[in-house]
Image (cartoon, grey):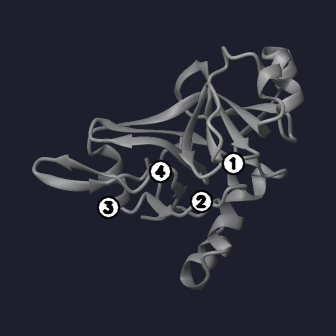
Amino acid sequence: MQGEGQAIGGRAMESMTGRLLVATPALKDPNFDRTVVLLVAHEAGGALGVVLNRATEVPVAEVLGDWSDLARHPAVLFEGGPVQPDSAICLARMRHPLRRVKGFHQVSGAVGTIDLSVDPERLRESIGGIRVFAGYSGWGSGQLEQEIADGSWFLLDALPGDAFVDRPDDLWPMVLRRQGGMMAAVAHFPPDVALN
């Protein structure tokens, strides 16, 4: 759960689960250029997240027909990251976040992952929308913390709707602009300018 500390090497680590990683212009990896990643798990062994702003053109109905009615616009698969692109992770937004629902694992507030082996018809009343990701983004123990320290990522708070925006291409500048100050200025950074 977000906010729970875990011991690493004798010191407590604050979990980043439920927070956003926003790629800085200094990040050189093309897999993550101008991406916004929601961390769905972060513990001593590493971190796992999904890229929220890389929509594909593949309709959810083509891959997971039974789930397509619950998919938020755009109802397409998203590229969750470069790891295991043949696997799927499904994020869901619950209508009643305090109600326990079989197959739902809370990430933060009303947002969490949902087990795709559960019958979606049984969840229709509980779920306000889903988003399906092909693959995920992963980091080994200490790797993500080092990338943040190196200036590759901004670590920011997520809003409940971030994972379900109608215009995912606008998410990177939108998240930066709402921070205000110098961070808002980064939202206007030209995409073709390299930082040394």
Which tag is nearer the camera, tag 4 or tag 2? 2
Residue 101, given in percent of the width and then of the height, sits at: 65, 31
- Counting residues from the N terminus, which is met first, the one under dot 2 or under dot 3? 3
Rounded to the nearest angstrom, the CA distance separating label 4 from label 2 is 23 Å
The three-letter code of the residue at mark 2 reads Ala
The residue singled out by tag 2 in the image is: 158
Q: Secondary structure at mark 2?
A: loop
Mark 4 Cα shell of 10 Å, populated few (<14), some (14-19), many (≥20): some
Q: Are marks 4 and 2 in contact (CB under 8 Å)?
A: no
- Counting residues from the N terminus, which is met first, the one under dot 3 or under dot 1? 3
- Counting residues from the N terminus, which is met first, the one under dot 2 or under dot 1? 2
Which tag is nearer the camera, tag 3 or tag 1? 1
Mark 1 Cα shell of 10 Å, populated few (<14), some (14-19), many (≥20): many
The residue singled out by tag 4 in the image is: 28
The three-letter code of the residue at mark 1 reads Ala
- Counting residues from the N terminus, which is met first, the one under dot 4 or under dot 1? 4
Q: Is residue 110 left or right of residue 76?
A: left
Q: Residue at horizontal 67%, vertical 56%? A: 160
Q: Is residue 94 left or right of residue 38?
A: right
Q: Is residue 105 above or below residue 171?
A: above
The residue singled out by tag 3 in the image is: 149
Q: Are marks 2 and 1 in contact (CB under 8 Å)?
A: yes
* Residue 106 quadrant: top right
Q: Is residue 163 above or below residue 138?
A: below
The three-letter code of the residue at mark 3 reads Ala
Which tag is nearer the camera, tag 2 or tag 3? 2
The residue singled out by tag 1 in the image is: 163
Q: Residue at horizontal 62%, vertical 25%? A: 102
Q: Secondary structure at mark 4?
A: loop
